[in-house]
Amino acid sequence: MQKWDVFVMGDINIDLVVPGVETLPPMGSEMVIPAMPTFVGGGAALFAMGTAKLGMKTVFQGRIGRDPYGAFIRQEIRRVGVDDTLLHDDERPTGISICFTGPRDRCFVTCAGTNDGLSLDELNLDEVRNARHIHLTGYQGAANHDEYKRTLINIREMGNITVSMDVGWDPTGEWPEAICELFPLIDIVLMNETECLHYMRRETVHTCAARIAESAGMAVIKLGSRGSLACRSGRILEVPAFRVEAVDTTGAGDSFNAGFISAYLRGENTEICLMTGNACGALSVTAMGGNTAFPAAEQLEQFLAAHGKRN
């Protein structure tokens, strides 16, 4: 019996949301707003919190500061059931991202803090052996390709753990084809449609997904308001999205990931995994904050039943 269902390593920070801002005030002036809510942020952290809410035994490895924001983060992830024994305190301040949101767009001011320089070389491989599955994020192309390849080889040699990886956006704009070297080492490759088209350099998301799945166990592509698709063993399956009123799209992709992987680890078929991911992603956008509206297992079942679906 393994100690955890899911091992997650990656970014964790504070999201400070400033809602209702269409333009920032000029220097020397002040804008007064009625609320400025604080949430746990970071793609890896939101994934971990989501899987824990769905009943997975989840552990998170990362860094927070020895400051009030770090204490808040630790309290919140414990509250939803994430094991924080591998969440380490650091002398640097906890990372924080200030999000100014308006009706049409948003912008960010971010300090990486304890996330700065986070490396997969810090991954506790001895503890990874105690998990059924590991989820990785934070790929940055040439900057950390070698450490990802090295780490994935080490994990694959363990033989008894499955791997998912959300590739994420490439801020350098390089979209290196070398990423294909990693696919044979990953059971589930997760991307959104734009990332998929950039990395695979093909005209349609379907041909991109098929190319990924030639070497990876499965390609899972998030299509936003159109839903999601998966390609496995040459077969592509697409499942439409659920329609909800969006309040805040922060963390929707990470919420999809958490739903999909939780269903996958329960042994569900691909269609159910996609449907579960779509439902979790949809529910997550109905409230401010990346994890606020993410459902517990019972709430997920109620949502699916209300839409004529059964998990």
Image (spheres, rainbow, N blue to C red):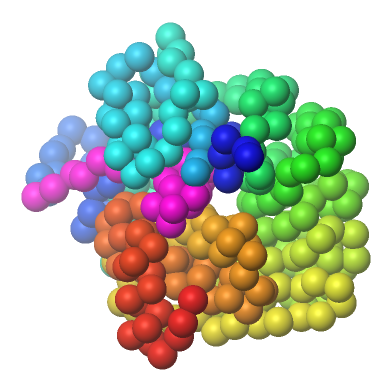
Q: Per the image, is 271 magenta?
A: no
| Apparent side of residue 107 relative to residue 259 in the rendered image (left or right) | left
Which of these two is toward me, 149 or 76? 76
- Tell me where residue 170 appears, x and y as whole percent: 68, 48
Q: Residue at x 80, y 71 (%)?
A: 232
| Apparent side of residue 75 relative to residue 253 in the rendered image (left or right) | left
Which of these two is toward me, 5 or 89? 5
Residue sticking out furthest to the top: 91
Q: Residue at x 25, y 41 (%)?
A: 38
Quadrant in which residue 146 is drawn: top right
Image height check: is 56 above or below 10? below
Q: Which residue is drawn at 77% across and 73% down?
A: 231
| Apparent side of residue 251 relative to residue 298 in the rendered image (left or right) | right
- Tell me where residue 203 appears, x and y as whole percent: 81, 76
Image height check: is 119 above or below 277? above
So how many labels did they put on this image?
A: 0
Image height check: is 108 above or below 53? above
Quick check: can you spot residue 7?
Answer: no
Which of these two is toward me, 66 or 264? 264
**Quadrant location of the N terminus?**
top right
- Tell me where residue 20 appears, x and y as whole percent: 21, 58
Quick check: can you spot residue 199?
Answer: yes
Q: Which residue is drawn at 36% across and 37% down?
A: 77
Task: Tell me the magenta residue range.
Answer: 34-56
Which of these two is toward me, 244 or 305? 305
Residue sticking out furthest to the bottom: 308
